[in-house]
Image (spheres, rainbow, N blue to C red):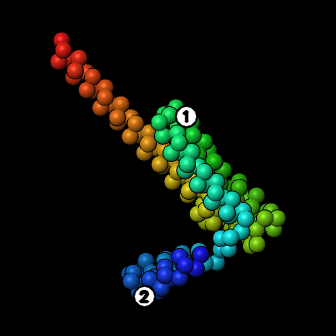
Amino acid sequence: MDVFWDPLAQWLGAGSLPAFFQHHADQTLEFMLAVDWYQPWLLVLLACHCICLMITLLLRNQSTALSWYFFLLLGLAALTQPLNQLGHQHWQQFATANYFDPSGLFIVSVYAFPLIFNGFVVLMIILKTTFGLMVETKRRQLTRKKNE
């Protein structure tokens, strides 16, 4: 991870951002450096998000399945608060530190945001398919009208 974080820390520390953004960039970087990203449960969570993205890409031509998958992703994202409470109660069993604060910043960052991003990708695929169908329908209407 140092290969990624060290250059980012140098760039952010070089005063390359306005003061307002510099403060938030510093806090974000501190947050990212404070987490041990090699914990097994975080690696499994990352793998799950990668699998979700692969499922999205595999379902891109199956509109009905993709629609159901979209609602599944949003349902999983809706479980963020109960999962945060469970994580707060049982963090000693799987984590080295209690990342599950009452505000839920950590779980939103590592669990909910990737699910919502994946849902956004699904939504873009559905919209692209819908627009394609609209264009095809209009072309058929024009062809039918031309042949009459």
How crowded is the residue under tag 2: few (<14 C-alpha within 10 Å), some, or many (20+)?
few
Q: Is residue 43 above or below residue 70?
A: below
How crowded is the residue under tag 1: few (<14 C-alpha within 10 Å), some, or many (20+)?
few
Residue 18, visible in the rendered structure: yes
- Mark linked to residue 99: none
Residue extending furthest toward the top: 148
Q: Which residue bears the numbered disc 2?
A: 14
Q: Position of residue 95 (x, y in %)?
A: 76, 68
Question: Which residue does the image show at 44% across and 42% down from the upper left?
Answer: 125
Mark positioned earlier in the residue sequence (2 or 1): 2
Quarter placement of the N terminus: bottom right
Determine whether, in the image, residue 103 is placed left or right of residue 4: right
Q: Is residue 36 above or below residue 71?
A: below
Q: Amino acid at mark 2?
A: Ala
Question: Which residue does the image show at 71% across and 54% down from the upper left?
Answer: 82
Q: Position of residue 113 (x, y in %)?
A: 55, 58
Quarter placement of the C terminus: top left
- Mark linked to residue 65: 1
Q: Quadrant of residue 96?
A: bottom right
Q: Position of residue 22 (x, y in %)?
A: 45, 81
